[in-house]
Amino acid sequence: MSMTDLFVTQEEYDDLVEQLVLKVADDGYKFDTILCLARGGMRVGDIFSRVHDMPLAILATSSYRQAAGKQQGDLDIAQFITKTGGEIAGRMLLVDDMVDSGKTLEQVVHHLKQQYPAITEIRVAVLWWKSHSVYTPDYWCEFLDNNPWIHQPFERYDAMGIERLREHRFGTDELVVD
């Protein structure tokens, strides 16, 4: 169970999302709801939503808050799902960026079955599935048997703050607006 680092470019990330959309489509799974887990699954869910021309449901969860976001703590699951266009019912496609420990997806699936009895089936789609996971997704793009820490392209914004963003965009000089 070695921990290495996997650095993913935006182009690689986009390619994986497209692969995942096609894997689910090629399997023939017909879903009534696309639910993404915020934050990691939002970009994945957005593409599924656009390709399928369906509203995106969002459920906020949080567990990686300690050690600069690298240590899993207790899972918080939002009380409500945000969604337009009807109830949460029928067949659901639950999307996230990865299955790491698997504890989040395991608890979320249990939560959904308890809180939304009109859901008849839940299938899970992720970009990365780590081998130390206790949860097995239905669809994935890459199985990672060395359980790396994944550096996604948008993580450069984590802890950046406004001043560092301003420096990044405009150099060290202040932006002057007339």
Image (cartoon, rainbow, N blue to C red):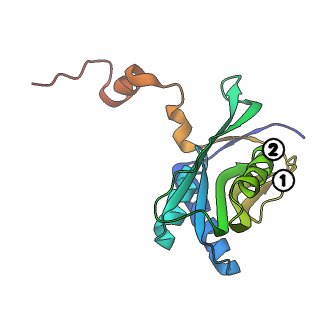
What is the three-letter code of the residue carrying label 1? Tyr
Q: Position of residue 76 (x, y in %)?
A: 69, 36
Q: Looking at the figure, which quarter contains the C terminus?
A: top left
Q: Nearer the viewer, residue 152 or 117?
A: 117
What residue sits right under mark 2 in the picture?
A: 103
What is the three-letter code of the residue carrying label 2? Lys
Asked if the residues shown at circle 1 and circle 2 are in contact, with their CB atoms under 8 angstroms apart, the answer is yes
Secondary structure under tag 1 reads loop
Q: Position of residue 144 (x, y in %)?
A: 80, 52
What residue sits right under mark 1 in the picture?
A: 135
At 88% from the left and 49% from the top, the residue drawn is: 134
Is residue 176 found left or right of 83 in the rendered image? left
For marks 1 and 2, the one nearer the N-term is: 2
Residue lying furthest left in this view?
Answer: 178
Q: Position of residue 18 (x, y in %)?
A: 57, 66
Q: Position of residue 100 (x, y in %)?
A: 77, 45
Give the CA separation, mark 1 to mark 2: 7 Å
Q: Nearer the viewer, residue 112 or 44?
A: 112
